[in-house]
Amino acid sequence: MEEIVCKKCGVVNEYKTEYRGKHLTAFCTACGTYIKHIPHVEPAMFFSKKYPDMKISECEDLQYLQWVHEKIKLSNRYKEAVERRIDELEGYKYI
């Protein structure tokens, strides 16, 4: 794992994370300064007003996911996560 360093006070790996819109954002716990956006470990539904910040893999609403797949323009990473979840809810198993 890469070290996350606060450019203001210099502490290393002392941060808290918060969702800010579609971004998972790191803030220094020592001085409170924004450090950087960090990659989501697992895609969250930042685009959703119905399920904000819920991980796609935790969504149980098949109809909503199908609607998202059809109506919302997503990056490949998010589109693939939605498709995978739809398949799981429809009973398809990945080996």
Image (spheres, grey):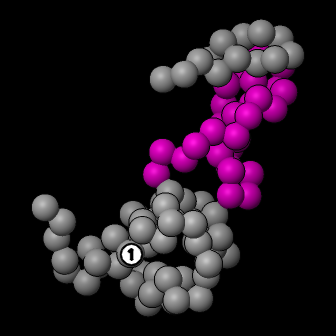
Q: Quadrant of residue 61?
A: bottom left
- Whether residue 15 is in magenta: the answer is yes
Question: What amino acid is at disc 1?
Answer: Glu
The residue singled out by tag 1 in the image is: 83
The furthest residue to the left:
95
Q: Quadrant of residue 52?
A: bottom right
At a point 67% along the width and 75% down the height, the residue shown is 49
Against 45, residue 26 (above or below) is above
Q: Position of residue 38 (x, y in %)?
A: 63, 39
The furthest residue to the top:
10
Q: Position of residue 10 (x, y in %)?
A: 77, 9
- Horizontal side of 34 relative to 46 (left or right) equals right
Against 76, residue 6 (above or below) is above
Task: Please tell me which residue lies in front, 51 or 23.
Answer: 23
Q: Position of residue 69 (x, y in %)?
A: 50, 83
Q: Mark 1: which secondary structure?
A: helix
Label tally: 1
At a point 43% along the width and 72% down the height, the residue shown is 82
Q: Position of residue 83 (x, y in %)?
A: 38, 75
Q: Quarter of the image for the C terminus: give it.
A: bottom left
- Horizontal side of 11 relative to 88 (left or right) equals right
Task: Please tell me which residue lies in front, 36 or 62.
Answer: 36
Against 46, residue 89 (above or below) is below
Task: Look at the image and give the residue range highlighted in magenta.
Answer: 14-42
- Whether residue 47 is in magenta: the answer is no
